Amino acid sequence: MNSITLNPKRDYSTIHHHPWIFSGAVREVTGTPRSGETVAVKDSKGRTIGYGSYSPASQIRVRMLSFAPDAVPDASFIANLVAASIGRRADFWVRGETNAFRLVNAENDGLPGVIADYYDGFVVLQLASAGAEFWKDAIVDAIRQFVPGCRGVYNRSDVDSRTREGLRTSSPAADAPLPNEVGLLAGEEPPELIPIQEGAIKYLVDVRRGHKTGFYLDQRDARDAVGSLANGADMLNCFSYTGGFGLAARAAGALSVTHVDASSAALDLARRNTDLDHLCGTKCDYVEADVFKQLRLYRDQGRSFDMIVLDPPKFADTKAGLMRATRGYKDINLLAMKLLRPNGILATFSCSGAVTPDLFDKICAEAAFDAKRDFQIVARTRQASGDHPVSLNFPEGLYLKGLILRAV
Ligand code: SAH
């Protein structure tokens, strides 16, 4: 088997089970491993400490699959990892509170670059790394075997990280995704919109055209937290996508919900999601606009709200984009803070991995200072527990941070 040997002092994190090996840590490559192929990983003294997937184009040169010299990954090893990961979610089927949840959370479930989300019998797969792509068939077979009542497996691997992984040979046009990245992998074609339910709330999910695999499953716990504070509120749901937080607030008795998003398709689906339930009493508005501009417009109009949600897309992909991201977060948080009524609630999120929880706290504290408002932290949220675990050896796994603040 081909192998890599690590530099002295650079083997520490691999010995301590961090799954990523950066190119600078590699002293020597023996053989010419292909993209995604498994290599033996040796410490600086030449002892095999595990195995990982080789990615010749990426800065993350190897992603670890096993940390034991005798655990050589093959198709059945991968199938066992998939089965174990699904097994850890067995409770979701038993409890039946929701029929949409994450089955495989990439590195945090020992399967680097592999995301598998379950939507009422259909599994949507996202293969973001060379190793994930290499093991595609084994992963799909295992999903079909181990997901109870699996109806179909659909590929949504149209992610930019595949360019960094050297998996894309051309750049996809907006309306024509690359054929090996999007489409049916096994079983039945999913319906145009898959109806899912989260507690008492129903949503329609567009797994073909929606963001990520179709729905922000990672915000499930935060939607609950926001709902619990929304009774009687006039709520502004910024970056609403298909309605998520607004629907949770409506179900909890919000007086009004104003959804703001730049995407008309997302707002159309938010409208349809609202119509799934005949709850009366909540006035719902849908505003197609840039949140940065809309918040300024509300400021100029003297509008105010009891509750504001800010759940923007990732502002920083890498450490290099951090400055711009920091300015973006500060701007929207400052504007939103000024629009809050006394005792109003701000639920603010960052899904940029490069923005640490500490930094996000600081950005919000500075925004509050500039807004001349004081806030209490009511709750902190992170990606939904249970189906979005974070591996203790992989701090990068915690990408989603939320602060629920009350103006005092
Ligand atoms: N809160 C949502 C997920 C938000 S995803 C949920 O829980 O389901 C981010 C959303 O922000 C996307 O729908 C995208 O269309 C929207 N968006 C991105 N940039 C924007 C901008 N500048 N103004 C308004 N919406 C924007």
Image (cartoon, rainbow, N blue to C red):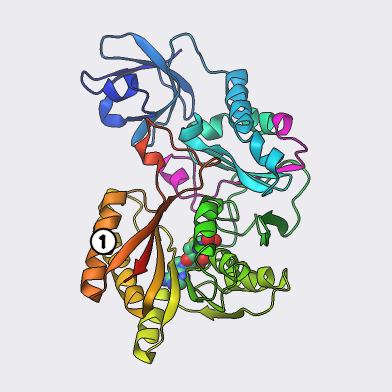
Describe the element under mark 1 as helix, strand or loop: helix
Residue 13 in the figure: left or right of residue 206: left
Give whichever of 144, 88 is nearer the camera: 88
Image quadrant assignment for residue 369: bottom left
Whole-percent x, y for residue 45 in the image? 26, 9
Residue lying furthest bottom: 301
Whole-percent x, y for residue 315 in the image? 36, 59
Magenta range: 144-173
Whole-percent x, y for residue 203 in the image? 67, 61
The amino acid pointed to by label 1 is: Ile
Residue at 47%, 68% in the rendered image:
239
Is residue 74 positioned above or below 322 on the image?
above
Image quadrant assignment for residue 205: bottom right
Residue at 41%, 69% in the rendered image:
345
Residue 218 in the figure: left or right of residue 322: right
Whole-percent x, y for residue 25 in the image? 27, 26
Residue 30 in the figure: left or right of residue 77: left
State the residue position of label 1: 363
